[in-house]
Amino acid sequence: MTKKYVYFFGAGRAEGSAEMRALLGGKGAGLAEMTNAGLPVPPGFTITTEACSAYFRSGEVLPEGLWDQVMEALRRLEEVTGRTFGGGEHPLLVSVRSGAKVSMPGMMDTILNLGLNDETVEALARESGDERFAYDAYRRFLQMFSSVVLGISDERFEEALNELKRRRGVELDTELGASDWRQLTETFKAIVRREMGEEFPQDPYHQLRLAIEAVFRSWNTKRAIDYRNAAGIPHDLGTAVNVVTMVFGNMGWDSGTGVLFTRDPRTGEKVLYGEYLLNAQGEDVVAGIRNTKPIAELSRELPEVYNQLVEVAGKLERHYRDMQDVEFTIERGRLWLLQTRAGKRTARAAIKIAVDMAQEGLIQREEAVMRVSPSDVDSLLHPQFDAAVKQQLAAEGRLLVRGVNASPGAAVGMVAFDADTAETWGKEGKEVIMVRPFTKPDDVHGMLASRGILTSEGGATSHAAVVARQFGVPCIVGARQLEIDLEARQMRVGERVVREGEWISIDGSTGEVFVGRVPTVHPRLEEQAELMKLLSWADEVRRLQVWANADVPEDAARARRFGAQGIGLCRTEHMFFGEERLPIVQRMILAESEEEREQALQELLPLQRQDFEGLFRVMDGLPVIIRLIDPPLHEFLPDRNQVWEQLIESRLAAVSQYVLGRRADGRIGELERLLASIEGMHESNPMMGLRGVRLSIIMPGIVKMQVRAIMEAACRVARDGIVVKPEVMIPLTGHVNELKVIQPELEKVAEEVMAETGVRVNYKFGTMIEVPRAAVTADDIASVAQFFSFGTNDLTQMTFGYSRDDAEARFLLQYVERGILPANPFQTIDREGVGELMKMAVSKGRRTRPDLEIGVCGEHGGDPLSIEFCHEIGLDYVSCSPFRVPVARLAAAQAALKLKERVAEREEVGSRK
Amino acid sequence: MTKKYVYFFGAGRAEGSAEMRALLGGKGAGLAEMTNAGLPVPPGFTITTEACSAYFRSGEVLPEGLWDQVMEALRRLEEVTGRTFGGGEHPLLVSVRSGAKVSMPGMMDTILNLGLNDETVEALARESGDERFAYDAYRRFLQMFSSVVLGISDERFEEALNELKRRRGVELDTELGASDWRQLTETFKAIVRREMGEEFPQDPYHQLRLAIEAVFRSWNTKRAIDYRNAAGIPHDLGTAVNVVTMVFGNMGWDSGTGVLFTRDPRTGEKVLYGEYLLNAQGEDVVAGIRNTKPIAELSRELPEVYNQLVEVAGKLERHYRDMQDVEFTIERGRLWLLQTRAGKRTARAAIKIAVDMAQEGLIQREEAVMRVSPSDVDSLLHPQFDAAVKQQLAAEGRLLVRGVNASPGAAVGMVAFDADTAETWGKEGKEVIMVRPFTKPDDVHGMLASRGILTSEGGATSHAAVVARQFGVPCIVGARQLEIDLEARQMRVGERVVREGEWISIDGSTGEVFVGRVPTVHPRLEEQAELMKLLSWADEVRRLQVWANADVPEDAARARRFGAQGIGLCRTEHMFFGEERLPIVQRMILAESEEEREQALQELLPLQRQDFEGLFRVMDGLPVIIRLIDPPLHEFLPDRNQVWEQLIESRLAAVSQYVLGRRADGRIGELERLLASIEGMHESNPMMGLRGVRLSIIMPGIVKMQVRAIMEAACRVARDGIVVKPEVMIPLTGHVNELKVIQPELEKVAEEVMAETGVRVNYKFGTMIEVPRAAVTADDIASVAQFFSFGTNDLTQMTFGYSRDDAEARFLLQYVERGILPANPFQTIDREGVGELMKMAVSKGRRTRPDLEIGVCGEHGGDPLSIEFCHEIGLDYVSCSPFRVPVARLAAAQAALKLKERVAEREEVGSRK
């Protein structure tokens, strides 16, 4: 018995189904499914991908039995259509199309109107009563078949058509008549005769056989192979071949063709959306020769068909349980569906549709949660440009440059080339885009005063990018074609120059920079009922908590509004960069005696306490993790080279004074001392130097002050009836003994404060796990630490041995482009390396302390793929920037659902064994 | 039945033995052991540590049954000595001493001559016929008992003795006579009466009981507790108490006391060595009041005793199977042994004794291998000062300063304050000690021209230290009291100034710096027959191979002489720093076109080839691992600040030229370009930036040149009949894809060269494992790499997140001092962290490739504790600096023996279960 290679569909029944995608290809499975669902699909049959594979295996010979099965299917087709293939008064015409398991749009071949020849075209003319239509169809078939199957250059036919139009003195195809088309078919057949040395095949069976083989072979064309290589599709899948009865939308004004979305793909509203043309073929809609009409008009033009469409749309949605994008044709008042698939939609629509469908009972709430991608949520929370407007602007040549889309959202403002200008303008109420080659910590005040940030250097995790994401400021980095001239206060791309103060618009979601002002919309979470609903469903599903990284009460408040369940990281040192504080911090660092240092710390104490009070009040009832000082102290001092230059300037000035017989001022000595201090603190690799817990051990004064500030704030706030849950986090621990040394000292301070104030609060001490050794020895470390928080940024740096800034500028992006790394490990957790260490830390840590609270506070906390991993390895929470909290809530829910599904699958497999 | 608390020894039989160290303490077990061995030991008994523990448990009450057992033992003692305790004509006197399981020298108490009172002292005088002796013994007992047991301040008694001497007008105790001592005993008893309000206890049983309790209590004095805390000794061990019959070396000229080594502890020669005094007590020998005589003289003074000593020495060595340090007393011609223990010895002696004893059949060869410490071998291979001479110099105030003993050996030379001076003088044949605040890579030529290196900054793994150890140059670093004035060409410590060109001597083994020339001896391995022998035995035992790190043929030759079995690391970039090469390398780096770069590489090719040819010739038949370029390119460029200063100087000069109406030279432009290049290459953490395999992927030209040079050299040398085994090592791999990208490109070069030359050699490609991620994903990496070499320096840096230079300068040494880290992880592998990753890499790597060759080429390869770990985890070899090869051979053997023993112990425990 030969294998079954052909699957028939038609007259309400199909041998295939949606599950047979691998065997029948996507299109074939879809046609079968629609047929079985009782939808009006032109009958036809699908030749399997196995046949294709067998064809290649046997050296391009059709497998045994295939042709017999095709003949048998053709017979059935003739039967259900009442037509005959290759002759008779009602000739059967078919389309022959490829259709692989995975969609490869435009990669493979299609032949329409197969079955026509010099005889049947006459029958078609008679049957349709439209000779022009018949010969138009025939000339199209001749051209398509000749180029696709016979391999004759398409140009030959185009030339002949153009020649004919020239001779007729017309511009459009529509201006040609029946006799013109008839004449053209003769010309086309002559071309074939000339090129092939033989006649165009008139036998439809022969045509069909050649067409099927041509579709098979199109699987192995160079462009198809290249496409599969690029898209990572296996080469051995093969393509199916769909042979489907032709239907015609150009058989008069009761015919037509169109595209239909079952809901509005822009807004998600539950109304039919789409366009159509009467008396036209699909190609005409695409070509845009005639203006299409909105689908609503069909209710007036062909009300019955419209009603049928409404019914079909409902059926399709109930069947596929998603919004569908449908291609249809109306042949003489009869509706045919040629294809249906899930419709593409905007983020807003995706959310509304998912929520509506769940509320309509069409899908489960969990399915709704799975239907929306986290990036949809993300894009909804940032200001946006209208895509159409952007397209328009690009067409007008107003797209200045593209860079790396570092922080999503749209922003419009006047260009400012330094942080101070940006801040000044910002205070004046102006909208500013700060543009720099790159940014540094002392640019932050300018960045915060800006609507957007644009840099010519740096990668997706450069300083500018990280800070921008943290504060939800749209940002584009690494726009390398941009030449910034800070002296001349202008930037240029090629010939185009933008001066300081001129308007630009940046789209942080796409990396595009436009000249001028592009209008934006700024959505708010609270106003988006469907999103709020969806997130509440996500919250029901997820196990992983979502906390936020926030340093100031405003951030914390926003985080809470967005659904954060705690603060996972408050970076105390960010508070040190404040304008009034930095001088005190510098005095503390440069102190020449313990008293001097202690005095500076005493000045900082009330300022820090105030910071923490605000946080605790906002986070009433929720945990707040405060990380003790982490960076090396030299980060708070001015740049060495800058001081050096000032010193030289001062000395040169002193020379002038000397020449003029005057005394020099005292600034030189001061600068010399400052320079000496800075140089004394120099480290060759500061990332791995004196910072974090190491700094606390060598110089415990700072962290004792910080713990005092935390606990004083906590006790004050607690006295007001607010529930405070401070958790003190020690960064950069590598050996448990570091904690054994410093933690008791700090706990003592905490107890002192509580004794002084007479208020008791529950506090915890824990540590970051961000050094590989901490992960490897997590069992030891958990004997002291009461919680872990993965600092996945540093852990990634040290596990790979990458200094992030250096790596992204020098080689990391090239690594990702060349596929050496599957993704930038600073964006998505590297499962095999960093992830393996995290798993080790979780299992070892919990072995020592089963109730150990474990989270992530690196930037990965806001990345959906990383969140999925965090869920899988059993973390308690992820902490991310406030703006990412809704994204993380959804991602955490999806992670839980995916894992549940995988477990269920495994169990099913297990029970089947 | 009560517990046995008392163990008797005497008359050739003891109840205890050497194995009962925990119960009887070290001393008690030793006395029992000697007694059983038939050696002349004064009889006595030991009260167990359990009695001590019971004493404390019950609140300082003697445990039940103890006193009865003491009485019983005293009866036996009276029996075997023929003396009576507390009366009679032959009074029995005893010493009462503590003796814990672990030696705690000077920490606990001793009472001599117990049993004396107003009555027995008279009997003693009669029996000895020496009243002075008897009262001298009594007054000593009174003082010792009163201070130790009764707690009366020792000063009272010293004052009384001094008062008596003042009154008698004498200076020395020896000038006092019998009546003086008798009078003093009355004074002493009066002191006790005054201080205690009661009489000195005259009942010897009472004395004994008080003394035993006092010894028990001495276990818990503050100083004993402090000592145990510091030494990590458990507090619950308790001390034993030894009650031993007194023997007297001061009973006339046929009595005496002395110390005996059974072999010469300085040289290891098999002759008795020691000193003695006749008619004297142990204290007299220690006090140095009379000059002791060498033991050989005893053969003339008391030939019988001497012969007995010779016999005893042999018996002791046969019994203890080691050279012994023996305390003895001769009482009226009769020899008594009071203590024996393994004698301390010099490195040279340790080796000779071990080898001799093995050859004498006294110990097994394996035991000989275990007897010598690796540091003994190390110290034997470096020039040395004589310890006595150093002591003399210190006494003369010529010890200038102490620093960190970074590289062992002694060196003498004239101070040079920079590398160029050192090199110039060195070429002139002068002996130079290079002194710098710290050293940098471009100081290496000066370091190599020097006999020794001294720096005021840096730690044990600073650049100076590492390079010095690599090249076996004695080195002291971090001599912080040293103020170096490079301008004035002098250095000072306090008031003492040493100018450039003056002589100093440095001892790299101890960290001492002396002013002037101290004579040295410089041993050679080949001349040290015993060491050669010992190492050959070590070679028979060890499994772990020892390879060497060598960049040049001279180093390789030395390594081979020292027994290296391969080159584990040749650092190709060290070759780039050569005087003639650096300019070419810089041209290559700064090249503005590919052609320019290629041309520079072509110039480097023959130079590198020549380097490798030399190495291959020397290592005929042995593997040579060559590491491709590792450091970031900016290391080969001048320092940024230096160029900046030159630029300012040039600009200032140009100003002068301008003022004088002349044109400035063109140097400014050149410097500006250089500065821009250097700044363009700046990285914030170069250790984790563009280096190693990353550099090779971004800029493959350099490594292709290197592989060509390696293979051309290999093929040339192979043509001369030499067996070449090149192994190309790719550094800093973190992801297997890095190898997948670069290795095939390099293998292609290798195949090209072999095709060109028509010679085939076997080569391997492998990688360093020095990034934590490489260890975690070693299974993947081994799918491409044919060998692994742990770069434990970088692996330690990244696992801990320590930048070595920064860490040691800022906090690491403090971490070690404060016990936060048990050891400097750059010296000894951190087993829990770094070691855990290494174990993971070994097991994962071998899972993929069972025959994977794995070694270590970090500095740990020369550290005995690290070598032990490398053996345990199954590495194939360690690679260390040539001078450490003998050390590593011994350490590898010891590692094998220790593991064998542990396995045997485990099996024994297992079989007993």
Image (tube, coloured by chain):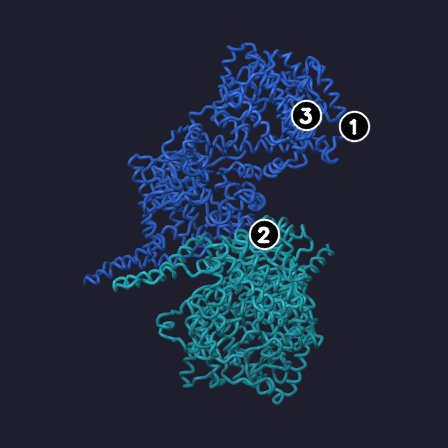
Chain colours: A blue, B cyan
Which residue in the protein does label 1 denote? A2
Mark 3 residue type: Phe
Which numbered circle lies on residue A200?
Answer: 3
Q: Quadrant of the C terminus of chain A?
A: top right
**Left or right, residue A285 beside residue A58:** left
Task: Tell me the chain of label 2.
Answer: B
User: Which residue occupies 69% across, 57% down?
Assistant: B906
Q: Quadrant of residue A367?
A: top right
Task: Tell me the chain of label 1.
Answer: A
Camera-nearest residue between A477 and B73:
A477
Measured as percent of width and height from the top left, residue A400 is found at: 40, 37
Measured as percent of width and height from the top left, residue B670 is found at: 39, 59
3D distance between C-alphas at marks 2 and 3: 54 Å
Which residue in the protein does label 2 denote? B742
Residue A567 seen in the figure: no
Camera-nearest residue between B121 and A181:
A181
Do callouts 1 and 2 point to residues on the same chain?
no
User: Which residue occupies 59% across, 11% down?
Assistant: A333
